Amino acid sequence: MPILDHFIPDIADITPFEAFHTQWAAHIVIDLNERLPEGFLAVPHTHIGDREVDVRTDKFLTSAKKQEIQALYQPEPPVTADVEFPSEFEVFVDYIERGRHITVGVIEIISPANKARSGERDSFVAKCRNLIAKSVSLIMVDICSQPFFNLHNQLLQSLRTTCGFLENQKFPLYCAAYRSTSGNNAKPAVNIWSYPLKVGDVLPQLPLFITSDISVPVNLETTYLEVCKVFRMH
């Protein structure tokens, strides 16, 4: 099913976008947990502030475990952008117990509230930038035709890079995946998989990295179609 315009009356009257957003996140969780290897778990709507955000989980994996999951999904990045991470000084106070959760990947389904006002846009982009800086794999999905704003481009501006931007579009829909890596001379860089979209397009598959070089596919189109069926959005 192609992307719907969730803000025209015929669609908005069936279900508000917030309800669709919640159900879509739940279906993505179900889909990911069917393919994630043992030891990894997807959960819906968890605030990063409640969890430890650490470097990649490579240091927790044995050689046997790495070989077991090595062939999952390793797409070549079409763009690798040299970036600068602004200096930040933070204090983390952690409550540590057995069974702690360390976030390795985040999927952000953008809502109208994320880009309605400059303050919300700045906060959202700052959160995404900090996740990437901490080597957390990030996916951003924006199928909101309203308000008219491109958070992907603002994120890249905040990273002080000159490539990977999406050209202005009549309907600025898009999705993108980001992975922190090393560029020339071991400088920080970000791999970017970005797709400009419009109403009527089919959603692509994106990589979510669970280690520095191993990812699982996030099936946006499949899960989107399932939610459309749930709400009878034919």
Image (spheres, rainbow, N blue to C red):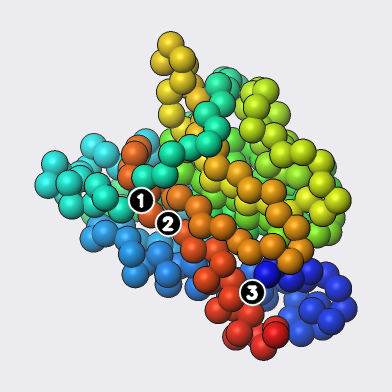
Residue type, label 2: Pro
Q: Badge 1 local density, few (<14 within 10 Å), some, or many (20+)?
A: some
Which disc number belongs to residue 217? 2
Residue lying at the far top of the rendered structure: 185
Q: Is residue 84 above or below residue 61?
A: above
Q: Quadrant of the C terminus?
A: bottom right
In the image, is 209 to the left or to the right of 222? left
Q: Is residue 136 visible?
A: no
Q: Is residue 205 above or below residue 223?
A: above
Q: Badge 2 local density, few (<14 within 10 Å), some, or many (20+)?
A: some
Image coordinates of residue 124 in percent, x first then y, are: 67, 45
Q: Which residue is mark 1?
A: 73
Give the CA separation, mark 1 to mark 2: 7 Å
In the image, is 58 to the left or to the right of 193? left
Q: Is residue 186 above or below residue 232?
A: above
Give the CA separation, mark 3 to mark 1: 24 Å
Residues 141 and 72: in front is 72
**Helix, strand or loop at mark 1:** loop
Image coordinates of residue 228 in percent, x first then y, are: 63, 80
Residue type, label 1: Tyr
**Helix, strand or loop at mark 2:** strand
Residue type, label 3: Met
In the image, is 99 to the left or to the right of 228? left
Q: Which residue is mark 3?
A: 1
Asked whether disc 2 touches disc 3, contact meaning CB atoms under 8 Å apart, the reply is no
Image coordinates of residue 60 in percent, x first then y, are: 22, 42
Asked whether disc 1 touches disc 2, contact meaning CB atoms under 8 Å apart, the reply is yes
Marked residue nearer the N-terminal end (3 or 1) = 3
Marked residue nearer the N-terminal end (1 or 2) = 1
Asked whether disc 3 touches disc 1, contact meaning CB atoms under 8 Å apart, the reply is no
Image coordinates of residue 17 in percent, x first then y, are: 73, 71
Residues 174 and 14: in front is 174
